[in-house]
Amino acid sequence: MSSRRRSDAGQASVELLGALPALIVLGLFLFQALAVGYSAVLAGNAAEAAGLALAGGVDANEAARAAVPGWSRARMRVAVTGGRVEVALRPPSPIDSVGRRLEVTSTAVVRAP
């Protein structure tokens, strides 16, 4: 019986090491999904703020940038065409090319009074 116990020693450690890459990939995937969702909410808020600013005769680009946290301003593009504002935001990502592909956009349209 003691020889069988010796052969099983360390088995859990080996299994954990085998599962560790899968757990890391799962964690990165979940982080990325949350980052994309949060970026979509931020883009929507920025588009709404820019649309309200545009309706009030204020700079829409500045209003959109003021509506988001500082870390996301460098990842944001704002395009104003007539009464239409489009905000594009790249979510944070450990892999930059993935973040570029997951860019989210939001649009607000304002009618001229």
Image (cartoon, grey):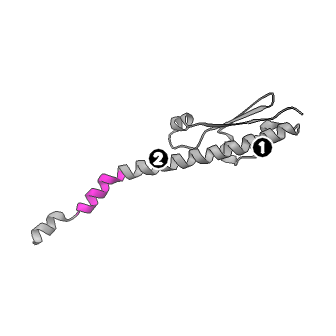
Q: Position of residue 64 (x, y in %)?
A: 75, 41
- The dot on residue 107 is none
Q: Answer yes or no: do the residues labelled 2 and 1 have beta carbons within 8 Å? A: no
Does label 2 or label 1 sit earlier along the sequence? 2
Badge 2 marks a residue whose secondary structure is: helix
Q: Please rate how many residues cluster around mark 2, counting C-alpha atoms within 10 Å: few if below 14, some from 14 to 19, many from 20.
A: few
35 lies above or below 12: above
- The stretch in magenta equals 10-20
Magenta segment, principal secondary structure? helix
In the image shown, does 26 or 9 lie closer to the viewer? 26
Residue 39 x/y as whole percent: 62, 44
> Of all residues shown, which one is farthest toward the top?
81
Question: Which residue is rendered at x = 83% and y = 36% of the image?
Answer: 54
Is 61 on the left-hand or right-hand side of 16?
Answer: right
Q: Quarter holding the C terminus?
A: top right
The reply, left or right, for residue 30 in relation to residue 41 is: left
Q: Residue at x 66, y 44 (%)?
A: 72
Residue 97 visible somewhere in the drawing: yes
Q: Which of 29 and 51 is in front in this view?
A: 51
Q: Which amino acid does label 2 sit on?
A: Phe
Q: Is residue 13 magenta?
A: yes
Please say if 109 is above or below 7.
above
Give residue 29's position: percent from left, percent from top: 47, 47
Q: Quadrant of the N terminus?
A: bottom left
Disc 2 designates what residue?
29
Image mark for residue 49:
1
The quadrant in which residue 89 appears is top right
Give residue 96's position: percent from left, percent from top: 53, 37
